[in-house]
Image (cartoon, helix red, strand yellow):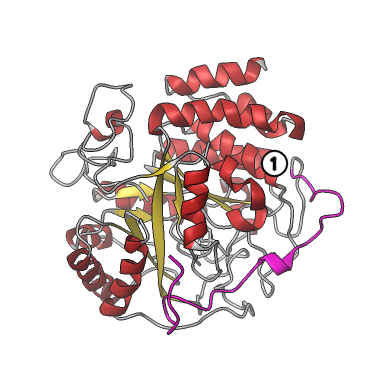
Amino acid sequence: MELLGRLVEKGLRREPPTRDEALAVLATSDDDVLDVVAAAGRVRRQWFGRRVKLNYLVNLKSGLCPEDCSYCSQRLGSTAGILKYTWLKPEEASQAAAAGVAGGAKRVCLVASGRGPTDRDVDRVSRTIEAIKEQNEGVEVCACLGLLSAGQAERLRGAGADAYNHNLNTSEATYGEITTTHTYADRVETVQQAQSAGLSACSGLIAGMGETDEDLVDVVFALRDLDPDSVPVNFLIPFEGTPLAKEWNLTPQRCLRILAMVRFVCPDVEVRLAGGREVHLRTLQPLALHLANSIFLGDYLTSEGQAGRADLDMIADAGFEVEGAGTTTLPAHRTGGAPDGTPDQGPGGGPGCGSHPAAGGTAGSVCGPAAEPGCGSGSGCGHATGPGCGSVATTGTSGAGAEPAAPGAGPRPDLVTVRRRGAGTEVAPNA
């Protein structure tokens, strides 16, 4: 297919596709999906080899959010039967993080529901970051706390945070249809604050809420303009008790096309397969590893994920390898470690994983961060997206370009399992 050949050539030299080309990827047929995956996979391997970065979510504060994000199980008015608890103590969060690190995660994402942190909350999270770093040498920490106020990003970085997650979720044109308690511009400003403080920015989207292809392309091009180091792609988990509980618009093939489009638009960025992958990709999850170079290990914020052991087996069986702690995630040209255009150096090859200057004017030595994860994956409240959460789209509608479920498929609420283990419980975590 001429389109795919052209997109591969552009991706290998980090040239973005046109909007029409991105839309054409989403419009390809199920018959062509393996060709699309193979083409985008060439771009993924050019910049990230066969490495898969593992990330682990710790939900510091669950539920009771004052924001009204339609996709979120923690939203104002949600009747979803999720865990609800206030702030974990630093030692509790550190213990939870250690389970993920022991399972192979090199990044821990600390998420808290709410509109944004108070200064006291920042102090609390700072102590948690210090406790995690003291117990787990070399681990990256990403915070996902919602909308930031002046000076808070700098304080988090001073406490040892490496990254900050805040998702755009959907296009600017439709944002007001999924959330009314804050704006698209609020989210953009928070991402920019994190970047200005020298934190590696993580910002992504949610798909599967009936959005149009144009909405998907709009938000991905907006993310490219923001230039985060990490772009989590979440797929809506339609929780019972939320406004989008009846939105089952995704097929595994459409999920693969969305991931391929993101890879072509953001060829050298960490693309994270986030919330909802188990629900919507199901048995085709291994194919998604040819497109995304990063996943969450185990459970999400309010929903259960695939067993951690199964994640590791899937990576190995698909011919990939878990990225080691000593490996720089992003290609060297994004970290200041090598001339522009040089592929990733592998272990020990670069100062870190941030394309934005750190405090002091030097390249950051951190990586970029998670759906329902909340840390870029799709379920958080006014702060992020996390798994268990959702995607992007017009509430209650099925826009042009959105595909219906496969014939005879229909809603599958049996695939949505509320988290009852790990952080905030006495049950061992899934890692």
Is disc 1 placed on a helix, strand or loop?
helix
Residue 144: percent from the left, percent from the top? 38, 62
Question: In the image, is residue 271 above or below residue 56?
Answer: above
Question: In the image, residue 351 lies at what x, y percent?
Answer: 20, 38
Residue found at the very far left of the displayed protein: 360
Residue receiving disc 1 = 253
**Which is nearer the eye, 151 or 267?**
267
Indicate the amino acid at tag 1: Gln
**x 62%, y 77%: residue:** 78
In the rendered view, would you say 180 is above or below 87?
above
Residue at (69% x, 73% y) in the render: 240
The N terminus appears in which quarter of the rendering?
Answer: top right
Name the chief secondary structure element in magenta: loop
Is 222 left, or right, of 215 in this rendering?
A: left
Q: Looking at the image, can residue 241 be seen?
A: yes
Percent x, y of residue 23: 66, 31
Residue 291, horizontal then vertical, whole percent: 53, 37
Q: Nearer the viewer, residue 370 or 135?
A: 135
Which quadrant would residue 14 be assigned to in this image? top left
Pick the front one: 69 or 230: 230
Report the span colored magenta. 402-431
Residue 50 vertical position relative to residue 77 in the rendered view, above or below: above
